[in-house]
Amino acid sequence: MAGIRLPPEDTDISPARPPATADLISDDDRSIAADSWSIKSDYGSTLDDDQRHADATEALSAGVNIAASDYSSDKEEPDAEPVTSMLGFQSYWDSTYADELTNFREHGHRGEVWFGCDVMETVASWTKSLCFDISQGNLPDHLGDSISESIGQGEKHLASWSVLDVGTGNGLLLQELAKQGFSDLSGSDYSEGAIDLAQNLANRDGFTNIKFLVDDALETKLDRRFQLVMDKGTLDAIGLHPDGAIKRIMYWDSVSKLVAPGGLLVITSCNSTKDELVEEVDNFNQRRAAVDQEACADPPPFCYLDHIRTYPTFTFGGVVGSRVATVAFLRK
């Protein structure tokens, strides 16, 4: 459900040193718009970050998109204010991964598994099945024949699918995908410490084919498109920044350029329900159509494909929900 954050499971590291308050404050004061975030990559050209933020602000003020906390179909009235957290700041993650990297070097510990091992393994196996169905031309009926024909048969073998995990953290999800048969694997994160940890873990565990690079999902420098883009908690963290509503707009503008036509975007969230994520995609599609009038005759960039139905559920106030949602969207 919206606003819920799962405690990390399967952690064998010693308690992490909390980031200094001064670090977090200075990060906020320096740049709510994330202008100070470190982007170090040799892939692609430099984007006009100021213009991206201005465009997102304009779209938000115009009412084309709404704050992430207002998306819930479970609520009669929107929250007065969006939920924010230190998890929305890069300084938090830099500090966290610095501690986890130290624990790895001193004790060999892999660190926290966000959402837990069970969820991670479920996401990997479910995604494999979904990609296999697409490779065989088996798409849900709600997509329609015209979309099915435009997608084609795709790649027959999972090993040939190009995969990017945005906000990869320690990179363990990519290791799980490698176990499922994917081999063209890349992970990106804006924290250099996360990339250092992920690379060390992959090398130690025998997954030397996985590529890792420092890149910000909001201001990506990648000029490659991927057939499968994974997000496990990254959109959640982005939405927890005080400027989260604007940053979520920037997220969709950026990620849409990373998913190849006919490719998949699979998002796992503990702060948004399946319906909220679908509505957020609908808002993005509407904004794209409004910006580019010529695109009105074309299908929207993303459409809902499927979601995981096997997560444990609970009922509160007569509404059935789960603590985690994993939703797949098809890039047209």
Image (tube, rainbow, N blue to C red):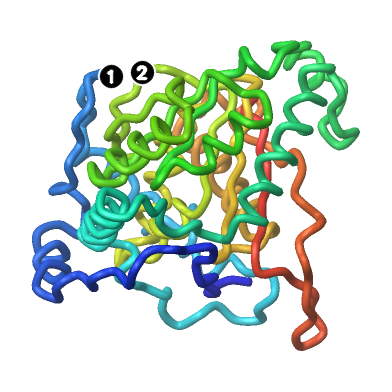
Query: Residue 304's x, y, as percent?
Result: 71, 41
Label 1 to label 2: alpha-carbon separation: 6 Å
- 270, 18: nearer the viewer: 18
In the image, taking residue 145 as reference, residue 296 lies left or right, namely: left
Query: Extreme bottom residue here?
Result: 317
Bin the neighbour count of mark 2 within 10 Å (Cα to Cα): few under 14, some 14-19, many 20 and up: few
**The C terminus - image quarter:** top right
Q: Which amino acid, mark 1?
A: Tyr
Q: Is residue 87 above or below residue 198?
A: below
Q: Earlier in the sequence, mark 1 or mark 2?
A: 1
Q: Are marks 1 and 2 in contact (CB under 8 Å)?
A: yes
Q: Secondary structure at mark 2?
A: loop
Query: Residue 156's x, y, as percent?
Result: 75, 11
Query: Extreme right residue here?
Result: 141
Q: Is residue 224 above or below residue 245?
A: above
Q: Which amino acid, mark 2?
A: Asp
Q: Write down the residue under mark 2.
A: 223
Query: Residue 265's x, y, as percent?
Result: 59, 36
Q: Is residue 185 visible?
A: yes
Q: Write down the residue under mark 1.
A: 43
Numbered tag placed on residue 237 in the rendering: none
Q: Residue at x 79, y 81 (%)?
A: 315
Query: Residue 92's x, y, as percent?
Result: 25, 63
